[in-house]
Image (cartoon, rainbow, N blue to C red):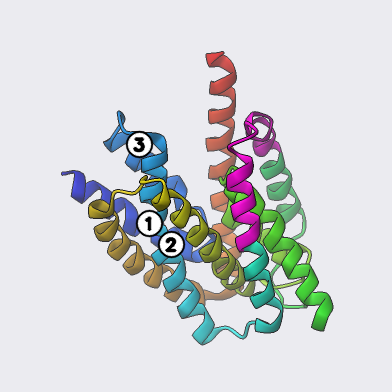
Amino acid sequence: MEWLILTAAAGLAGFVDAIVGGGGLILVPALFATFPAAHPATLLGTNKSASVWGTAAATWRYARRVDLPWRALLPAVGVCLLGAWAGAWLVTRVRPDALRLALPVVLLAVLLYTLARKDLGRHHRPRFSGRAEAWAACAVGGGIGLYDGFFGPGTGSFLVFAFVRWLGYDFLRASAAAKLLNTTSNVAAVALFAAKGHVWWHYGVAMALANVVGSLLGTRLALRHGAGFVRGVFLLVVTVLIAKTAWDAWGTVGGH
């Protein structure tokens, strides 16, 4: 039964995550519900060991069909990797409690801004080119990579929003670029968790296969229906993220 629950959750997580991010909303709670007595780091590491393959598969699929500015994104990959490692180190020194409380408010601002700007992300109108685009992409990769290593929830949505709002991408290209950087931060996280012995590989392999299948299906749907569809899924995922992070933050406060 455990295998069935986790593979189903991994497949659904890969499907959602490939479109706009947010797969952790599905797979992480499934792991914690299935193994309530396990060490949280082990469950998070096992989640990453599966999701990294799904994001990699989505990146590969998008790269074949979507025209991406590789000269800007490849430097951003390196910066994102460094940011994720720095964030993972920082969380060993500083507790992210204040960030946990602020996150629902930030996500709500993202949701309201996107709703208010009806044309946001519907058309691809890059604001930068050449080195300026590379610097902007590096800033996104470094900043959100740091956040992903330090805390994590909503990383995919923040990446998509940053590429849409700041760099002027449409939602489809923003999702493709976000998958590339998210794969990088996932690789950094898996390496860290694995080095500490916090990955259950026997579950991770089966979950990874399901995650890849779900990811390829989600990518296919996004490519078929375009930026407008991705925008709609983005709004739905951010709304769920607001509810989830607000519940977690207020529950923590109430628990104290």
Q: Which mark is residue 32?
A: 3
In-image side of 28 versus 242 (left or right): left
* Residue ID at (55%, 51%): 236
Q: Secondary structure at mark 3?
A: helix
- List x then y, in percent, for residue 19: 50, 65
Residue at the spot of label 2:
52
Quick check: 38 above or below 228? above
Instruction: Nearest to the eye among marks 3 and 2: give it.
Output: 2
Q: Secondary structure at mark 1?
A: helix
Cα distance, mark 2 to mark 1? Answer: 6 Å
Categorize mark 1 by other alpha carbons within 10 Å: few (<14), some (14-19), many (20+): many
Cα distance, mark 1 to mark 3? Answer: 15 Å
* Residue ID at (25%, 52%): 203
The quadrant in which residue 114 appears is bottom right
Amino acid type indicated by mark 1 = Ser
Amino acid type indicated by mark 3 = Phe
* Residue ID at (53%, 15%): 255
Instruction: Nearest to the eye among marks 1 and 3: give it.
Output: 1
